[in-house]
Image (tube, rainbow, N blue to C red):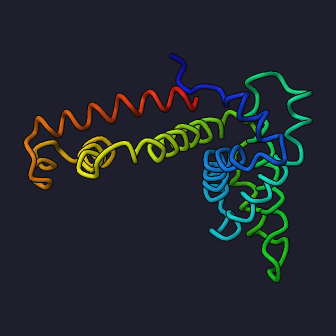
Amino acid sequence: MPELPDTRESLLLKVGEPANAEAWQEFTAIYRPAVYRLARKRGLQDADAEDLAQRVLIVVSQKISEWRLTSPQGAFRGWLIAIARNAIINALTRGTRGAGIGGSSILARLEGQPDRDAENDGPEIDEEFRRGIFRQAAEQIRPEFQEATWLAFWLTAVEGLAVDETARRLAKNEGSIYASRSRIMRRLKEKILELS
């Protein structure tokens, strides 16, 4: 199995439909956090990174139909990275409103930026994609399980708490903790495959 599945073409097609709010919500849940983190890593403050993520998503919504017509399959994340990187560079060169422009601080920030090679940002987008798919899958399957079962899974598989400690906290035996975690992991894998 490849390290990361490509962005589902079906999702990209649906995002291109202006009336498909559900597809857009799914898309933003996956990619907005990635763009935000990329902006923060490049030195933008929280509010500026939020604004930048919004601007990038607006550009994507306006240009997604053109991308499908001109880009090879599998190149979506590279296209998204290029849009985000350009927006970050623009934000850094513009500076904040009311602040002085130019000088050594802006130059230092620009020089501190990595090369414009998309490979530098690819792993971040890939990692955020995996997190987005996980969050979405977990949110969708959680109602299928009792709270104690979900908590046993979450504490051991996500938070990394030892099984014996989890059993003690939940007043259950270790076998039930393992069984709960196993059932949810199996269902989670199914849902992730479905979403990928």
- In the picture, which quadrant includes the C terminus? top right
Whole-percent x and y of residue 111? 74, 54
**Between 17 and 104, the one nearer to me in the picture:** 17
Q: Residue at x 85, y 67 (%)?
A: 94
**Between 177 and 85, the one nearer to me in the picture:** 177
Q: Specify whether 18 is left or right of 42.
A: right
Residue 6 occupies which quadrant of the picture? top right
Q: Residue at x 68, y 33 (%)?
A: 119
Give the answer, above or below, for where 33 lies relative to 92: above
Whole-percent x and y of residue 13? 79, 33
Give the answer, above or below, for where 176 lies relative to 44: above
Whole-percent x and y of residue 50? 68, 64
**Badge count:** 0
Q: Residue at x 55, y 44 (%)?
A: 132
Whole-percent x and y of residue 146? 28, 48
* Residue at the far bottom in the pictured view: 98
* Residue at the far top in the pictured view: 1
Q: Residue at x 10, y 44 (%)?
A: 164
**Between 125 and 105, the one nearer to me in the picture:** 125
Give the answer, above or below, for where 64 lies relative to 37: above
Q: Specify whether 186 is left or right of 109.
A: left
Residue 55 occupies which quadrant of the picture? bottom right
Q: Specify whether 42 is left or right of 12.
A: left
